[in-house]
Amino acid sequence: MASTLGTVAAGIAIIIFGYLIGFRKMLFLIIGYSESNFYGNKDKYAKRVGLFVVAFGSLIITMPFSVMVFGDIATEVYKYLVITMVIILVVVSNYWRFRY
């Protein structure tokens, strides 16, 4: 029960960070972001990263409940989903560096 509450709390915190990045345009929350050498559209970048972080937080929140319903197979599915989402997030976050 405590781990479920901890996972839900972590998911909510991640969603809040995604909201701050995507809708409040607080780009300094993104690791590696530097306004001095960013050449892309900041609004599009903030929305893409923020939306992805919110989706990641939602995935984290639903994980303990799906494990309770589906059992250990859900853990394996979530493991690969999280790995895939982290790789995509790294690519999306660093896409502006590869464009120029």
Image (cartoon, rainbow, N blue to C red):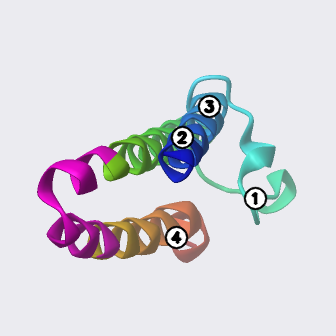
Query: Label 1: which residue?
Result: 33
First in sequence: mark 4 vs mark 2: 2
Marks 3 and 4 sit apart, C-alpha to C-alpha, by 19 Å
Find residue 16 and name its label: 3
| Three-letter amino acid code of the residue under disc 2 | Leu
Query: Label 4: which residue?
Result: 90
| Three-letter amino acid code of the residue under disc 3 | Ile
**Residue 6 position within the rendered picture, expressed as x and y whole percent measured from the top left:** 59, 46
Q: State the SS at label 4.
A: helix
Query: Label 2: which residue?
Result: 5
| Three-letter amino acid code of the residue under disc 4 | Val
First in sequence: mark 3 vs mark 4: 3
Magenta span: chief secondary structure: helix
Query: Taking 7 as reference, is 79 above or below it?
Result: below
**View extreme (top): residue:** 24
First in sequence: mark 4 vs mark 1: 1
Query: Taking 83 as reference, is 18 above or below it?
Result: above
Q: Nearer the viewer, mark 4 or mark 2?
A: 2
Marks 4 and 1 sit apart, C-alpha to C-alpha, by 12 Å
For this rendering, which residue is in front, 28 or 7? 7
First in sequence: mark 2 vs mark 3: 2
For this rendering, which residue is in front, 60 or 49? 60
